[in-house]
Image: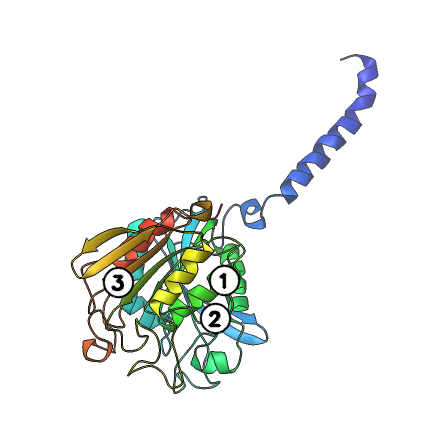
């Protein structure tokens, strides 16, 4: 080294150190620390949203590797349900293990100090349902905060966060598609139609909808069913599907797939590769296709088809529709 170059050494080292520090700040804190705080297993978590303590449960499959971004499915319980009941009827923990996604079971709200109010834990899905709607609970804000909390604990794939749910939970999926489309990649509602009076998503959203034609709670043809919650009036399945066909710029006849008493109507591709799918279950009740009855059985809820598995079909669908 020439004697004159010795004078340049301190400034060169300083430049390298400063450049390295800038790069380090651009790396997520969890990655700088070497790992995320939680691994595979089952967790119950809480957070405060709008001054209210909120809860959610998480199942992380055994295949989870903290160094690899992992897809997430949010599974919203129906009105009167909770994360435990949703796990039981949907069998989604098992699907999580089969396919390697993290499944999250959010929890709605009810009357303070009571485990379940007369209408149970509910979601403010717009025009429904119960305590959450009446008290204008910000369940979109809750979902946003829940995803923020989830990202701190696990290495989630932000382009592959999806939502499903049944009944009032299905209606919540539609609200998220309308208002949180920058974080929710696609949705798969079951036995629940749209419950918002206006919907202006920031991008085309792909939808896979499951519904039984003999649903007595959320009637396929809309209106009020013989077992609907008091005061609830539902949009029809056809109206809901028509909205998303128009919104996603989907035209033409669908491709039809038949499996026993279930018929799948596949529309697409539309704007930005979007897709809308309706699975209509002939004679099906207010149930999760391929799922399991909980404490409310067949006599109360109606038929549950085993001709299709909603979990398998939605996972196949979700894989085609990450955020772009």
Q: Is residue 249 above or below residue 291?
A: above
Is the residue marked by circle 3 packed among few (<14), some (14-19), or many (20+) residues within 10 Å? many
Q: Mark 1 to mark 2: distance in Å?
A: 9 Å
**Secondary structure of residue under mark 1:** helix
Residue 35 percent location from the top left of the image = 50, 48
List the single residue furthest toward the top: 2
Q: Earlier in the sequence, mark 1 or mark 3?
A: 1
Q: Earlier in the sequence, mark 1 or mark 2?
A: 1
Quadrant the N terminus occupies: top right
Question: In this orientation, which residue lies closer to the viewer: 306 or 22?
Answer: 306
Residue 152 against residue 57 in the figure, above or below: above
**CA–CA distance in space, label 2 to label 3:** 22 Å
Task: Tell me if 154 is positioned left or right of 227 in this view.
Answer: right
Q: Residues within 10 Å of mark 1 (few under 14, many from 20)?
A: many
Q: Residues within 10 Å of mark 2 (few under 14, many from 20)?
A: some
- Foreground residue, 266 or 293? 266
Q: Which residue is mark 1?
A: 178
- The residue indicated by pointer 3 is 280
Q: Earlier in the sequence, mark 2 or mark 3?
A: 2
Residue designated by label 2: 196
One can see residue 239 in this view = yes
Judged from this view, the residue extending furthest toward the left is: 260
Up-down relation of residue 122 to residue 24 (above or below): below
Q: Residue at x 55, y 67 (%)?
A: 141
Q: Residue at x 38, y 86 (%)?
A: 230
Dots 1 and 2: beta carbons under 8 Å? yes
| Residue 151 drawn at (x, y percent) | 51, 55
């Amino acid at each position: 080294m020439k004697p004159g170059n010795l004078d340049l050494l301190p400034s060169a080292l300083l430049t390298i150190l400063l450049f390295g520090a800038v790069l380090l700040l651009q790396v997520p804190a969890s990655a700088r620390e070497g790992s995320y705080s939680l691994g595979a297993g089952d967790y119950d978590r809480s957070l405060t949203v709008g001054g209210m303590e909120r809860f959610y449960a998480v199942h992380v499959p055994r295949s989870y590797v903290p160094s690899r971004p992992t897809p997430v499915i949010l599974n919203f319980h129906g009105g009167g349900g909770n994360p435990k009941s949703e796990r039981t009827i949907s069998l989604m923990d098992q699907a999580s293990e089969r396919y390697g996604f993290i499944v999250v079971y959010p929890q709605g709200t009810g009357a303070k100090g009571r485990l379940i109010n007369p209408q149970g834990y509910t979601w403010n899905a717009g025009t429904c349902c119960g305590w959450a709607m009446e008290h204008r609970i910000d369940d979109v804000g809750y979902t946003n905060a829940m995803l923020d909390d989830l990202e701190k604990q696990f290495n989630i794939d932000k382009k592959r966060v999806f939502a499903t749910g049944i009944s009032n939970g299905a209606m919540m999926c539609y609200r998220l598609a309308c208002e949180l489309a920058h974080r929710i990649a696609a949705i798969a509602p079951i036995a629940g139609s749209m419950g918002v009076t206006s919907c202006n998503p920031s991008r085309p959203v792909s939808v896979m909808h499951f519904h039984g034609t003999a649903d007595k709670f959320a009637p396929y043809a809309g209106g009020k069913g013989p077992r609907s919650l008091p005061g609830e009036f539902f949009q029809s399945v056809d109206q809901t599907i028509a909205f998303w066909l128009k919104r996603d710029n989907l035209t033409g006849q669908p491709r039809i797939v038949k499996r026993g008493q279930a018929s799948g109507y596949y529309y697409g591709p539309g704007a930005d590769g979007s897709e809308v799918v309706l699975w209509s279950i002939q004679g099906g009740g207010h149930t999760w296709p391929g799922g399991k009855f909980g404490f409310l059985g067949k006599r109360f809820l109606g038929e549950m088809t085993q001709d299709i598995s909603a979990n398998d079909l939605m996972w196949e669908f979700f894989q085609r529709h990450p955020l772009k």
